[in-house]
Image (tube, grey):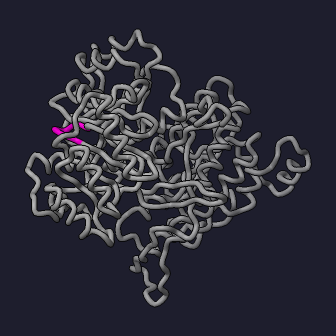
Amino acid sequence: MNMKALISVSDKTGIVEFAQALHDLGVKLLSTGGTAKLLAEKGLPVTEVAEVTEFPEMLDGRVKTLHPKVHGGLLARRDFPEHMAALKEHNIDTIDLLVVNLYPFESTVAKAGCTLADAIENIDIGGPAMVRSAAKNWKDVGVLTAADQYAAVLAELKANGKLSDKLRFALSVAAFNRISQYDGAISDYLSSVKFEDEKLSEEYVPERNLFPEQANSQFIKMQDLRYGENSHQQAAWYRDLYPAPGSLATGVQLQGKELSYNNIADADAAWECVKSFTESACVIVKHANPCGVAVGKDAQEAYAKAFQTDPTSAFGGIIAFNRPVDKAAAEAVSKQFVEVLMAPEFSAEALEIFKSKVNVRLMKIALPKGGQSDWDNGRNAMESKRVGSGILLQTSDNHELALADLKIVTVKQPTPEELNDLLFAWKVAKFVKSNAIVFCKNGMTMGVGAGQMSRLDSARIASIKAEAAKLTLENTVVASDAFFPFRDGLDVVVDAGATCVAQPGGSMRDQEVIDAANERGVAMVFTGVRHFRH
């Protein structure tokens, strides 16, 4: 095989085996620096690029491949006689395969205490330049930028002695995508640095802005969708470059129809909500709002309680569990019409039960391992909202309320049972569209009022739904996602039956609302945090 491959990799995973396979096929190997040394140590015949360029590596390796004999060999079009004549005139050989991965900039700047000097030194120059040259000339050059591409390239070389146009073009696209990701990461980092020249040194660790001067988002398409939120809209589903473990994007669909745009949006709301519970929990979502949430001794009990809240809305809903779905839970759920069912695992008996319900979408999503970071908990660190010719960025609402955070502001004190239910209600309210009013008792939602312009109307809707489900709001606790600006908000939930109220506090009329609670003989706590969800 009369081909030449130039190999220069920072991450050397699988490179020796790949180079050996190329050599076995008769491909001549060129390489640089540490890669050349490694291949030579493994007994492979390799020519250093410095021999080809007749120019030594210099400036601590900063300059080694930035040379016409490299870029000419990559860029020359084989179907242009004038290009080939120029190569011959200048004694430049063509390069048919380029294998390059870049200096580890992203992982370097992700390390705590990364210095500016170290970040800058890990900006690759020659690598991206070669990748761009090879990717531009895709008809003649195959460019590999990741180890997971090696197998496909070897398969075609062994089968056909060359790469197909289709594979070379795909490799070119992947290469330009990688360069885009790399440059975006550099831009994100440098745009976030608070530059202080008086502190400059090799040990200088710059302070970084949470929101860089330029934001560069990179997403990978998972699938095209049949349509968007409405049938006249087009849509696709993308994931982060590096999705957090336990996030929706890591899920695997086990059966059922293709997920729709609305399925995915609602599934995310359900999954994020159910993940927030440590007890066995079930969340039923309809039109982005939880219409039933409960905890129980197991998945089946949690589902039964959640479904009871609002059976009408639960019809055709999205259901999420934070425990494996066993036979009992599957039998209970299968009696209803469900669009999507999510869980960390499904038993063999559960899968068998749903086998006949071919349209039901089953999603298996591993729970995150948990930890201190958003990543460890499978959460987004940032969230965005599109506005006219712009975007709003904010840190995600990942606040978790603890018992110690509650400030009791009334004469009447909540009971331990009420405090547990208050924390439960608060978790749910966080995932209900504003204005949110959530009544709960004994670890289940009793009435949910969502998305109204007035908090009073949200409370009334919650009461109506409870009545329709033949549930009583007597002696319930209630959570409001934002403060009561007047006492009428407090009065309406107490009139409905609540005996204990959780709200953020922070209104100019807080004292008026506290006085009203004392007058009505109910307990009230301030959480000190608001959970608007629009």
Query: Could you tell me how many numbered marks the image carries?
Result: 0
Residue sitting farthest toward the top: 356
Residue 58's spot in the image, x, y percent? 59, 70
Query: Where does the N terminus fall, quadrant-wise?
Result: top right
Residue situated in front as seen by the camera: 268 or 203:
268
Q: Residue at x 64, y 23 (%)?
A: 159
Position of 160 with respect to 19 (left or right) is right
Position of 319 with respect to 288 (left or right) is left
Residue 333's spot in the image, x, y percent? 31, 20
Residue situated in front as seen by the camera: 259 or 508:
508
Q: Quadrant of residue 464?
A: top left
Q: Quadrant of residue 395?
A: bottom left
Work out whether 213 lies above or below 67: below
Asked whether the viewer can see residue 246, the reply is no
Residue 366's spot in the image, x, y percent? 32, 35
Q: Residue at x 27, y 24 (%)?
A: 325
Residue 151 highlighted magenta (yes or no): no
